[in-house]
Image (spheres, rainbow, N blue to C red):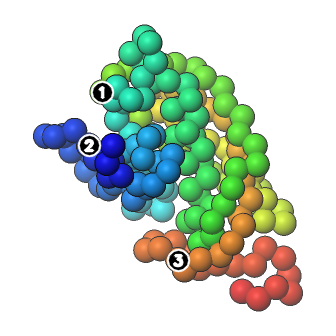
């Protein structure tokens, strides 16, 4: 198996989406994933349901939807803090199925921040159908250089270097 995850030949993601460069480890198995930065500052992560993402009923496997939730909802910490992060808790409510070849997107908003712990509310959707909603608790663990479009790292408590 190659380390490169790519879309099927002849298929292009919707306008504005670019391949998420996650080619090692678990990302190689779960991908390909795509990301988009909207003009209003929102970020979404997405994937097209392919055979490797499907369950026995040819729907996106719940584990794949949770993987998207983990990446899409946690990604907001990267954007807001230019930090690596880990998932502390992920709570998901499954509401609808995604089918083969569906384009599935996810995004989130920060509800609160305390001691580098981010409480996030998220949603996964396909077109106008909500597939999943939930909450996540993510911890910022190590600062890094900001990627294009990300905010510079900020200390979360007074007195720490910015």
Classify mark 2: helix, strand or loop: loop
Which residue corresponds to mark 3?
A: 146
Mark 2 and mark 1 lie on one chain; the one further toward the N terminus is: 2
Quadrant in the picture for residue 12: top left
* Label 1, residues with CA under 10 Å away: few <14, some 14-19, many ≥20: some
Which residue corresponds to mark 2?
A: 7
**Marking on residue 85:** none
The image shows residue 68 at horizontal and vertical percentages of 52, 40
Quadrant of the snapshot with the N terminus: top left
The image shows residue 54 at horizontal and vertical percentages of 42, 23
Who's the residue at 67% across and 35% down the image? 134
Classify mark 3: helix, strand or loop: loop
* Label 2, residues with CA under 10 Å away: few <14, some 14-19, many ≥20: some
Mark 1 and mark 3 lie on one chain; the one further toward the N terminus is: 1
Who's the residue at 56% across and 56% down the image? 75
Comparing labels 2 and 3, the label whose residue is closer to the camera = 2
Which residue corresponds to mark 1?
A: 101
Residue 126 visible in image? no
Q: Spot the residue most to the front.
A: 1
Who's the residue at 32% across and 52% down the image? 4
Who's the residue at 75% across and 43% down the image? 89
Quadrant in the picture for residue 95: top right
Mark 2 in CB contact with mark 3 (< 8 angstroms): no
Q: Is residue 161 above or below residue 141?
A: below
* Label 3, residues with CA under 10 Å away: few <14, some 14-19, many ≥20: some
């Amino acid at each position: 198996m190659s380390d490169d995850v790519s879309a099927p030949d002849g298929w292009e993601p919707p306008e504005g989406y670019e391949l998420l460069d996650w080619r090692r480890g678990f990302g190689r198995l779960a991908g390909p994933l795509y990301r988009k930065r909207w003009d209003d500052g929102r970020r979404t992560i997405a994937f097209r349901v392919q055979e490797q993402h499907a369950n026995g009923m040819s729907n996106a496997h719940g584990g794949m939807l949770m993987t998207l939730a983990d990446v899409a909802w946690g990604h907001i910490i990267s954007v807001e803090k230019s930090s690596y992060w880990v998932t502390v808790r992920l709570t998901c409510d499954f509401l609808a199925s995604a089918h083969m070849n569906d384009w599935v997107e996810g995004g989130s908003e920060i509800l609160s921040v305390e001691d580098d712990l981010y409480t996030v509310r998220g949603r996964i959707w396909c077109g106008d159908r909500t597939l999943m909603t939930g909450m996540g608790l993510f911890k910022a663990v190590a600062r890094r250089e900001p990627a294009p479009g990300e905010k510079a790292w900020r200390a979360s408590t007074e007195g720490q270097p910015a």
